[in-house]
Image (cartoon, coloured by chain):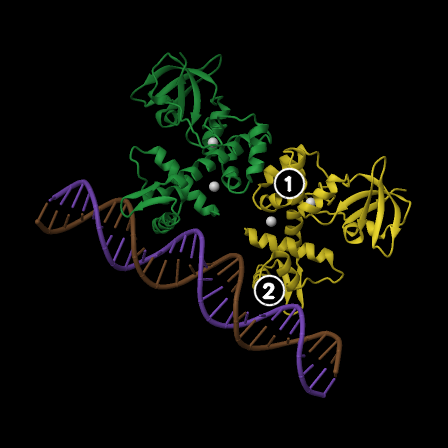
Chain colours: A green, B yellow, C purple, D brown
Amino acid sequence: MATVTVENYIKQIYLERLKIKGDVVSMGSIATALEVAPGTATTMVKSLADSELVEYEPRVGVRLKDNGEKMALGLLRRHRLIELFLVKILGLDWSEIHDEAEMLEHVLSDKVMEKIDVLLGRPKIDPHGDPIPSATGMLDERNLVPLNQCEIDLKIKISRITDQQADFLKFLEKNGLMPGVTITIIERNQFADSIMIKIDEGESISLGSAAAKKILVELIS
Amino acid sequence: MATVTVENYIKQIYLERLKIKGDVVSMGSIATALEVAPGTATTMVKSLADSELVEYEPRVGVRLKDNGEKMALGLLRRHRLIELFLVKILGLDWSEIHDEAEMLEHVLSDKVMEKIDVLLGRPKIDPHGDPIPSATGMLDERNLVPLNQCEIDLKIKISRITDQQADFLKFLEKNGLMPGVTITIIERNQFADSIMIKIDEGESISLGSAAAKKILVELIS
DNA sequence: TGCCATACTTTGATTAATCAAAATTATAAA
DNA sequence: TTTATAATTTTGATTAATCAAAGTATGGCA
Ligand SMILES: [Mn+2]
Ligand SMILES: [Mn+2]
Ligand SMILES: [Mn+2]
Ligand SMILES: [Mn+2]
């Protein structure tokens, strides 16, 4: 059985891999993401390699093997199902579920996960808009556009939030900027580095490009 | 923050304390209950004493201090609320919830526990009939009688099961012997070491005294 | 009283996970 | 090509939890 630590490393390697262009994940990015010293990441990754979960090439990086990828997708599924459960069934706020799920993903049995999945109606998307892998490890990453790169005057739908920091999520919630909401960019100011958006039948809000970049949207035909 | 291991020791010391006449728990009983070597229990209890959670007297035993008792009651509350949640909300069988709760009790946040408590209507009793301590650490152990020590021909109510082994619980469930059910002892055979009981408006079943001892009942006036 | 079985404690190791700091490499700049 | 910088790896320690096996104490029995 993989320990909680091993599971966290495997999942993080998967997530870092998604973020970058390259196909190999650096020790530095793992160490930063998991908040451990660089040497710790190196040591741990070597031990993951001994367990056949990853391929590790010194001074180059690490890549998940089939085993590892399967584990990562299983964890991602657990994490996201748990988040949705915490919001839908227990009524927690979407800003406080991530850390909770970070622990629970390692602890809930398959039996409990199946009950939760059924209770939620086998959902495909979590509260942040992240896709939930299927029980068989299928994951479809939708092709979404960062809000800051969107054209003006088009009708678009907020679909996914890539920054799960509690404060940022609370800000979005307070302003009604949650997945599912449709909006239009009504103004863009290149030099002020900001955009002005209008929620359908609602308020107008100004967003800096750093914030807008964390909001992924879908164009409505 | 107490580790999972520390929490398990503290809870076990509390539970062992309840089982015995004396007021001090032996290293041996802890080691057996937690399935660790005797020396491990000694070492660990000494470290609990360093943390001011217990008082430890070498070769005599260990007793919880106020801190420790508070922690134990908190865990017991969590454990039992979680068990009830797993049965009532997720629909697990009462025979498979104990191990699940054994992990979850260390991981769910206070916020989640409060949501669960509310969702369940602030219950006082778990699926095995075990009392749930209040959030302030109040626990009322009801005064119940083991079924094997009960008089014949009286109307009695099954109230608590002290053996939580899955197989035993499954047996009880199959025969309708769950907390809340009312029964009568219709026969007792001293030499066969068994009793015959009849479920109200139901079947008659024979139980050996070892099994009957694990079923606590309440006399119905 | 003295022995001894049993329970308990101590000792010396091991494993997993971590860190700080020193050593090494690779790469980009001069 | 040489050097400097940044990333990575290695080394030596530490902490928590555990075990096996050796050592110790104590309460009853002879
Ligand atoms: Mn995690
Ligand atoms: Mn999420
Ligand atoms: Mn536990
Ligand atoms: Mn119970």
User: x, y percentage for residue A87?
Assistant: 56, 30
Q: Which residue is at a point 83% across and 55% down the rendered structure image?
A: B193
Residue A214 to residue A49: above or below? above
Question: Above or below — where is B158 with respect to A181?
Answer: below
| Residue at mark 2 to residue at mark 1: CA–CA distance | 30 Å
Horizontally, residue A15 falls left or right of residue A176, namely: left
Asked which quadrant contains residue B153, the reply is: top right
Q: Nearer the viewer, residue D1 or B152?
A: B152
**A181 on left or right of B216:** left
Q: Quadrant of residue A151?
A: top left
- Local secondary structure at mark 1: helix
Determine which residue is flagged by label 2: B38
Say which residue appears at 55% left-offset and 40% top-offset: A108
Chain containing mark 1: B
Image side of residue C29 versus residue B191, left or right? left
Q: Considering only order in the chain, which callout, 1 or 2, is on the residue closer to the N terminus? A: 2
Q: Residue A171 location in percent, x, y?
A: 47, 27
Q: Residue furthest front?
A: B192
Number of residues whose C-alpha sits closer than 10 Å to that of mark 2, classed few (under 14), some (14–19) or many (20 or more): some
Host chain of mark 2 = B
Residue C20 at x, y percent in the picture: 36, 56
Name the residue that disc number 1 marks. B82
Residue B67 visible here: no
**Marks 2 and 1: same chain?**
yes
Q: Is residue C29 above or below residue B143?
A: above
Amino acid of disc 2: Pro
